[in-house]
Amino acid sequence: MGSVGLLYVGAVLFINGLMLLGLVPGKAAAPMNFFVGIMQVVFPTILLVQAEGDPAAILAASGLYLFGFTYLYVGLNLTFGLDGEGVGWFSLFVAAIAVVMGILQFTVVADPVFGVIWLLWAVLWLMFFLLLGLRRESLTAATGWFTAIIAHLTATIPAVLLLMGEYRSTWTWATILAVAGVVALVLSFLLGRRGPLRTPPELQDTGPDHTLRGPADSDPRDGGRRRAAV
C-alpha cells in the first residue's frame, strides 16, 4: 500500500473509531470517509493502468480497493442513513481477503511486517462484521477502541516510517507488532466493558421502536441497529 494512502487510512480509521466511541457524530465523520475512499479507488486504478501486466504491481494495487470501497460504503451510509448490515457482510469478505493478503506478504513479497499488518486488519474487519453484520451491539465500544488504536499501529506509524525512508521489515519488528496488536485487542475489550465514552444528543434513539435514520441518530450502545461506522 502506498505510504500516502496508508497515512490517510490511519486518519479515517481513527475518526471512525472515535465515532464508535461516541466522540464524533456520524455525519461529521462522513467527509473523511469519502475523501479517503475516493483516494483508495483512484490510486489503485492508476497503478493498474501503469502495471502493464506486472503481477507484483497488480497485487499491490488490488488490496487498496478493499479499503476504498469500505470507506465509500461507510460514507454513503452515514450521509443517507442506510442500514449497516451491508457494510458488515462486506467486512467479512474484506477480512477473508486480508488473511490471504497477509499470507502473500509472508510468502511472496517477503514483508513480514505487512504480513502482520494485514492479519491485524483481518481481525479488525472481522469485528466490523460481528458488530454490523451480526448486530453484536456489545462489541461497539471494544470495536471503537481497537479501531482507534490499530489505526496508528498498522497505518499511521508505518506510513510515517515509509515517508521518512526508515521502514524496515524484519521478523523482529513483525513479532513486536504482532504482540502489540494482541495487547491492543485485549486492552480494547477491557476498555470496552465501560461502554462508549460519550453519547452525544444526536446519538440517541429516535423513537420507541428504535428505528434509526442514520448513525448520527443512534445510541452507540445499540450496535445492532447502528448504521455503518468503520
Image (cartoon, grey):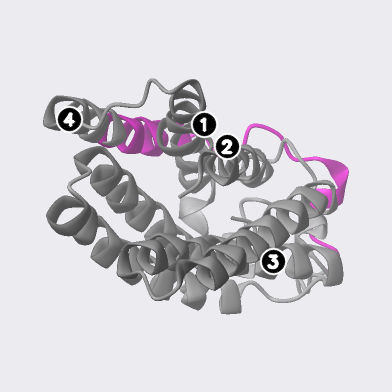
Earlier in the chain: of badge 3 and badge 1, it is 3
Q: Name the residue under label 4.
A: 170
Tag shown at residue 72: 3
Give the numbered dot on residue 156.
1
Q: Give the range drawn in magenta.
A: 182-207
Q: What residue type is labelled 2?
A: Leu
Task: Note whether residue 130 is visible.
Answer: no
Mark 2 surroundings within 10 Å by alpha-carbon count, few (fewer than 14), some (14 through 19), many (20 or more): many
The residue tagged 2 is 7
User: Counting residues from the N terminus, which is met first, the one under dot 2 or under dot 1?
Assistant: 2
Residue 9 or residue 79, whichever sits in front: 9
Q: Residue furthest front?
A: 52
Q: Residues within 10 Å of mark 1 (few under 14, many from 20)?
A: many
The residue at 21%/60% (across/down) is 104
Contact? badges 2 and 1 (CB < 8 Å): yes
Few, some or many C-alpha atoms within 10 Å of disc 4 (few <14, some 14-19, many ≥20)?
few
